[in-house]
Amino acid sequence: MTIELYSEEYNQQVEIARKSTESRLKRKDINKGISAFNESIRKRNDIVKAKNKAIQKENLRRNVRTRENRIPLRQRSGLTYRDNKRIREINKAVERDNKKRNEGSLELLIAEKTKPYVPPPKFIREFIRKEKEVTDALKARSQTDWLEAMKVIRGNNLRRQIACIIWWDFLSEKQSDKFDPYTYKTISDKITSDEIKRALLAIGYTPAKAENRVVSMNSSYRYIKKADRIKNEQKKETCHST
């Protein structure tokens, strides 16, 4: 079902997209600080890890020496009750020695915890998920699918404009020979932004994608017109100087 331009649902999605962009920019600044903090924590934790490795090695050395001196208790028919009693007494002495050694073991250093990054709000995560689903579906379209979708667009000038947008967004790195008749022709600058938005909605773009596409396209046009104006002024200056 195609969403009508400037309908309540259209405006809601555009507003969520705006909030999503604002939230992303705010979180970018916050997470940048968190990233710098976590990097310092990671460096300190690397030092702690190296020290703990040395501590574990020293504790192992102490305990290994104690275990090697331990006399195992063996119940064999060749040993008398007196022999077994003597072995138990020796083992108890070894256990007491082990306990003292364990009490004297070096304690491991505690690593610091890093701060978690700030996630986007739930409603923005859901919005981003749906936008991604639509984008993936549009990316999966072939030339034929796009040409079929473009049949709802009336007017050759508008159809050429939308074909160029489709080519730039989804077909520039794919086989797109069927779009050559559209992209090789001059585009009219008399097409309004609303006409382009309606056409993009009709072929499957979301309101947020349609709005962003028109904004970026208008920015590009302004840049191109400014560049053309500067070139023309430079040509006039060159002609006057000669």
Image: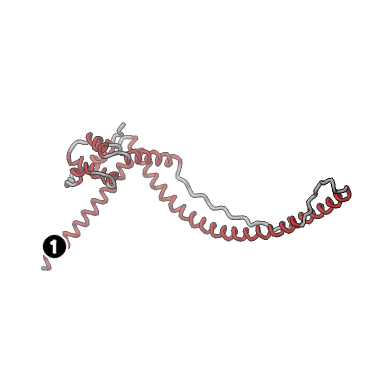
Q: On screen, 80 above or below 207?
A: below
How crowded is the residue under tag 1: few (<14 C-alpha within 10 Å), some, or many (20+)? few
Q: Position of residue 159 (x, y in %)?
A: 20, 40
In the current view of this chain or complex, which residue is farthest to the top? Answer: 1
The N terminus appears in which quarter of the rendering? top left
Q: Observer-nearest residue: 36 or 56?
A: 56
The colour scheme is: secondary structure
In the current view of this chain or complex, which residue is farthest to the right? Answer: 82
Q: Is residue 43 visible?
A: yes
Q: Observer-nearest residue: 191 or 178?
A: 178
Q: In the image, 4: left or right of 19?
A: left
Residue type marked 1: Lys
Residue drawn at 33 percent across, 37 percent down = 10
The C terminus appears in which quarter of the rendering? bottom left
In the current view of this chain or complex, which residue is farthest to the front? Answer: 78
Q: Position of residue 2 (x, y in %)?
A: 30, 33
Q: Observer-nearest residue: 21 or 8?
A: 21
Residue drawn at 21 percent across, 54 percent down = 225
Q: Position of residue 147 (x, y in %)?
A: 23, 37
Residue 227 position by quadrant: bottom left
Residue 67 position by quadrant: bottom right
Q: Observer-nearest residue: 205 or 226?
A: 205
- Residue beneath disc 1: 236
Residue drawn at 24 percent across, 52 percent down = 222
Q: Is residue 192 visible?
A: no
